[in-house]
Image: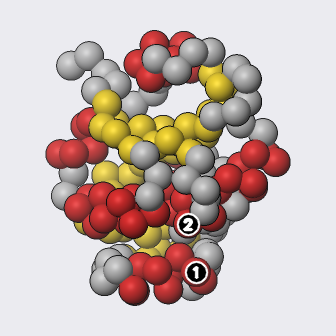
Amino acid sequence: MNGDPHLYELLKELNIDFEYLEHPEAPTIEIAKQYWAGHDAQHCKNLFFRNHKGNQHYLVCLNCDRDMAIHDIEKQLRQGKLSFASEQRLDKYLGVKPGSVTPFGLINDTEHHVIVFLDDTLRQAEKVSFHPCVNTASLIIKRTDLVRFLEHCGNRFEWLKLYDE
């Protein structure tokens, strides 16, 4: 299986079942969507930001069918001016490369530095999908198992209403 072997070990330890989808490299949602057709999960877009000072990092998980400008995300998160984190910061905090951002990367954030914000619309999904730390596969898990995974990792996370309905 493609992805971080430690991730698969942890999922097994936590009794988190998953559906594994191997596919060609999919660094963007537009590319990945063609490989997700026919699967009953809410696929997610994951964005990794840093604050203006560079001393705090945020992982934002959104419904992949929604678009949000960085200014709108700044207003919702109330964390000040944000910018996309560099490739070096992605590697340092999540252990992933650009195009592979995922909450599963939190297994590499042993100091629990990254704060996670989850799109409240994802609460309606029974299953969600993320890359397993590489963009050549996707894992589908129950939303409730995602919450268990996040709780196990120990990073602060919260659900936010990111869109006006």
Task: Specify the quadrant that holds the N terminus.
Answer: bottom right
Q: Residue at x 31, y 52 (%)?
A: 42
Residue 24's x, y, as percent?
Answer: 63, 67
* Along the line of sight, the residue nearer the viewer: 71 or 63: 71
Spatial CA span between label 1 and label 2: 8 Å
Residue 57's x, y, as percent?
Answer: 62, 37
Mark 2 Cα-neighbour bin, 10 Å: few <14, some 14–19, many ≥20: many
**Residue occupied by mark 1:** 6
Amino acid type, label 2: Ile
* Along the line of sight, the residue nearer the viewer: 131 or 87: 87
Element carrying mark 1: helix
Residue 14's x, y, as percent?
Answer: 35, 80
Element carrying mark 2: helix
Mark 1 Cα-neighbour bin, 10 Å: few <14, some 14–19, many ≥20: few
Q: Does the CB distance between marks 1 and 2 fall below 8 Å?
A: yes
Q: Find residue 144 and report its image quarter.
A: bottom left
Does 1 sit above or below residue 155? below
Residue 142's x, y, as percent?
Answer: 26, 65
Task: Specify the quadrant that holds the C terminus.
Answer: top left
Q: Residue at x 35, y 60 (%)?
A: 151
Query: Does residue 35 appear in this view?
Result: no
**Residue occupied by mark 2:** 107
Q: Residue at x 56, y 45 (%)?
A: 114
Farthest residue to the right: give it: 88
